Image (cartoon, rainbow, N blue to C red):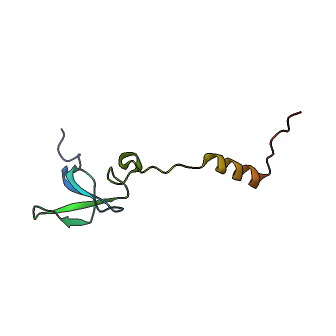
């Protein structure tokens, strides 16, 4: 690798702000925030909105949408009518 053209690859803490889950990994992500980790060291903190701990696919808490109700609401709102059968 060429010197001076790559970002700094260092330990970083990613924290899911929706549930408080945090994990330590290495990254080149730039941030101004820091956090004191379990080992007593201070690391850069990257705040994320969703992670595997809060994503519905991984937690199994998926919401079922009422697709038929949404379609009927759309048709009613925009005046679409079903063709009448003869």
* Residue at the (74%, 49%) spot, across then down: 75
What is the x, y in percent for residue 33?
26, 66
**Quarter where residue 47 is shown:** bottom left
What is the x, y in percent for residue 86?
89, 33
* Residue at the (33%, 49%) spot, across then down: 52
Q: Viewed as shown, does residue 64 lie left or right of 48?
A: right
Near-viewer residue (5 or 78) = 78
What is the x, y in percent for residue 66?
60, 49
Which residue in the rendered view is the most extreme toward the right?
Answer: 86
**Quarter where residue 82 is shown:** top right
Q: Viewed as shown, does residue 81 lie left or right of 13?
A: right
Near-viewer residue (85 or 29) = 85
Depicted 13 relative to depicted 67: above or below: below
Instruction: State the count of labels.
Output: 0
Quarter of the image that includes the N terminus: top left
* Residue at the (83%, 39%) spot, across then down: 83
Near-viewer residue (55 or 60) = 60
């Amino acid at each position: 690798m060429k010197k001076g053209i790559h970002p700094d690859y260092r330990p970083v803490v990613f924290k899911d702000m929706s549930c408080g889950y945090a994990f330590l990994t290495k990254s080149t992500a730039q941030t101004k925030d820091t956090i004191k980790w379990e080992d007593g060291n201070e690391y850069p903190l990257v705040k994320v909105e969703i992670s595997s701990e809060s994503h519905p696919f991984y937690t199994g808490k998926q919401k079922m949408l009422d697709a038929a109700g949404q379609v009927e609401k759309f048709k009613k709102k925009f005046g679409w009518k079903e063709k009448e059968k003869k």
